[in-house]
Structures are given as C-alpha cells and as structure tokens.
Image: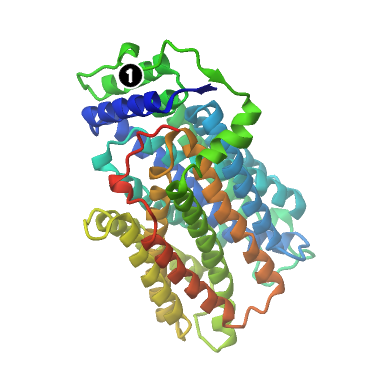
Amino acid sequence: MAMLHYEEQNYNMALLNASIESIGMGKYQWQMFFTCGFGFVVDQILLITIALVMPQASKEFDVQYPKMATVAQYSGLLLGALSCGIFADLFGRSLVWQIALFGITIWTLVCAASPNFASLAVFIGLMSFFGGGNLAIDLTLFCEVLPKRKSWLLTLLAVMWGVGNAVTTLIGWPLISNFSCPPDATPATCKRGDNMGWRYVYITTGGLCFVMAIIRVFVLNIEESPKWLVAEGKYEKACTSFNKIAKINNADIALSIDQFRGTDTSPEEISAFESFSLYHIQGLFQGKKRAISTASIFLLWMCIGVAYPIYTVFLAYYLAAHGAKLGDGSTYQTYRDLTISSVVGIFGPALAAYLIELKFLGRRGGMAIMAIVTAAFAGAFTSVNNEAQNIAFSCMINFWQNGYYAILYAYTPEVMPTAHRGTGCGLAMACGRLASLAAPFIGTFGDVTSSVPIWVCMALYFVMAGVALMLPYESKTYDDSYAR
C-alpha cells in the first residue's frame, strides 16, 4: 500500500471531489441508491426473521435458552462489521460488497435445513456475518460517489428498513399462520412436517436475497470507488472508474492521470499487517478533533446498541407484569401490529432527511431531536394499558427511532477519512453490535419486570442527544479532501 505526501493526497482528493460534483446526480448514483437499499432491506430481514422463527423453532427443538440464537446473530453481525470494513479498506469496496449478498443468500437457505437448535444458531451467525459486513460497506460506497449537495439521500436511504421490515412480516404472516404447530405444542408433539412454516420463511427470504444479489452484481453496472482508488494511489484505475461513471451519467467530463500530483514518485510501501494493525485504525484518531469525532461516534453506536434491544426485550414483560391488556396475543394481532409499525417506520427516515437539510439543525441537531422524542415516547410507553395504546406508541417509537438511526448511519461514513472509511464504519457498527450482545443475556437471566432498564434506556437516549450536539463536525460542510 502506498504512503504518499499529505499535500499531494489532499490535492488529488480535492480534484476528485470537484469532478464528482461536476458530473452531478445521475443514472449511476440512482442505481447505487437502489442497490444500496438492498443492504437495508436485508438487514431488516435478518433481524425480523429471527423474531418470527424462534417461537416456532422452539416448539420443534428442545431449547433451554432460545435467546442464545440472538447471541449468535449479534456475534455474527459484530464479526462481519469488523472484518468486512477492514477488508474494504485493504482490498477495495466493490468486491466485499458484491460477495456479501451471496453469502447471506447461501446461509439463509441453509438455515431452512437446520436439524437442531445448535446448528440453526450457527447458521444464523454465519448469515449475520455477511449481513453485518454488507451494511458496513453500503453507505461507504454510496457516500463516495454522491455529490455533496445530494448527501441527504444517505439518510433517506434508510426508508428501506421499513420496507424490509414490512416485506418480511408479510412473508412470514401466511407461512407461520398456516404451516406451524399449535401454540401449546412441545418438542414431543411438534413434528418437523407439521412445523415447516419457519423453514418456508427462510427459503422465501433466501430466494429474495438471491434475486437482489443477481441484480446487484450482474444487472447494475457498479464500479470500484474512485475515492478509494485515489486514496490508495491507484490513479490510473481511479481515472478509469470515474470516466465510466461519467459516461453512464452522460456527463461531458473526464479525468486523466496527468491531472493528479505525485504519480511519478516512488511511494513508501507498508505491509498488509502494518496496514491493518496500525495504519487504518490510527488514521481514525489522527489529531485531537478527529479523535474526538471518532470516539463520539463509537459512543453513539454503543448507546443505541444498548438502548434499543434491551428496551425491546424488557417492555413486553414489564407491561404484562403490571397489568397491561395488550390484546389476545393471536397470530393475527401479532402480525397486524408488526405490519402497521413497520409501515409507519418507513416515514421516520424521510422526516430525518428533511430535518438535516435545515440550516439551524443539520445532522447534529437532527440526531438530537430524534433521540429526545424517542426518549419521551419510550418513557410514556410505560403507562400503556390497552391494545390501541400499544400500537400507537410502538408506531411512534419505530418512527422516531428509525429517523435517529438513519441520520447516524449516514453521518458515520460522511465524517470518516476516505482511506479509513471502511474500517471506521465497520468499527462503529461493531461497537453497536457488541453492546447489543447484552440484551439476550439480560432478557434471559435478568429481572424483566423491573422498570430500571427502561429508565436506563431513556437516559441513554438523552445521552445520545447531548453527544450528537457536541460532535465536532457538521457533515454537510465537512471536507473529506484529506485522503488519509
């Protein structure tokens, strides 16, 4: 890997940034928006399917701690975000990005053939490994070809979460309802042939992932990130990649290697081990301001990683223990409520994309508002005592929570230095996944009727709001010309 002079790197990245602004928002960027949206859909498929599958699989398998499947899932997401983010900085964005959906497809289909709970948990972990890696690269790749004036699309992209949530729920609804053992079934009475619904869910969602993988790799023409190529000193390849993008956009502009500086010098080479262990990680903390920015982003991811899943785990138990009447618990009610909440959640990122473009708010103010409103609804949710209130508050929390997540997901790659963006995004998401690992253990072994975890989660939302306001960079005006 080449180590080039800072001034030359900064000039070259500034040249490429100006060129990307010149070609504008065209066909290529809309293709990227579409196919990067697949990553958000798949992320929700992973999270929702386990919630749909485990109650049914537990009837068939003798499972003492079914929430350990969630441990396998978050472990896979953690390792995937870490490794794929680093690989994207070492070997390029497009290769890792294209492989990810095929990996998810394979292991999702394999999950359907699980002979016991242990194997199912392992397959869920492997499926999640590719899922965690995919989402870490999606916004990194999209961010690096998007004109600055259209950066709000990074936030809007998260509407695909709600789409993925709703699609998965609608797939699971008829399959689980019609091909599952009765609610009171046990491993002694529930046979595989009578409980194929959850396996059909994996087969169907695996097929959907396969279609998205085919479209991403073979239908849409996606080039390697020219910014990554420039950051690596691969100027000839960067020119080729950029010029292909410009041609797809019908833009009358081209780059040549003669426009870059330092292309005729002999770069200092460092080993892949040094690049991994020192270069990309140290680059995230180079200088006081950048170190504060990176540490703050990691803290935000850890806070939301704790708050959201623990809140989700505890709330239903807490309300039931305190006399709330949330309906009959039928399959119809469960899937109806999930579908309504999912559809409402689609519009949270849309509002977030609008708020971040307001000059007096920006990304930092938008995140703070979303976190504070989520905290307010989370606290109010503890007073829910009937089915209508449960649906209403679930929808509102999903709406504002998705809005907060959308801004955080978009902000993270925007303020990471180009050469280290994959590693930075991967580490940030890994912090969230690592924190989320606490949820299944607390849900299994903790006192789920206590109100303390809910109020702790509320406090974390307020912490997130405070940290967001103190972030040193406003990404709309952030200049990533500093390549390293």
Q: Observer-nearest residue: 75 or 412?
A: 412
Number of labelled discs? Answer: 1
Residue 19 placement (x, y as % from top left): 26, 26
Question: In the rendered image, is residue 345 in sight?
Answer: no
Q: How is the image coloured?
A: rainbow
Q: Residue at x 77, y 66 (%)?
A: 64
Dividing the picture into quadrants, the one containing residue 418 is top left
Residue 454 placement (x, y as % from top left): 53, 77
What crowding class fits label 1: few (fewer than 14 Cα within 10 Å), some (14-19), or many (20 or more)? some
Q: Residue at x 48, y 65 (%)?
A: 335
Question: For mark 1, what is the residue?
Answer: 244
Question: In the rendered image, is residue 452 in sight?
Answer: yes
Where does the N terminus fall, quadrant-wise? top right
Q: Residue at x 46, y 27 (%)?
A: 217
Where does the C terminus fall, quadrant-wise? top left
Residue 176 placement (x, y as % from top left): 57, 59
Residue type at mark 1?
Lys
Q: Is residue 171 left or right of residue 115?
A: left
- Against 441, is 410 above or below? above
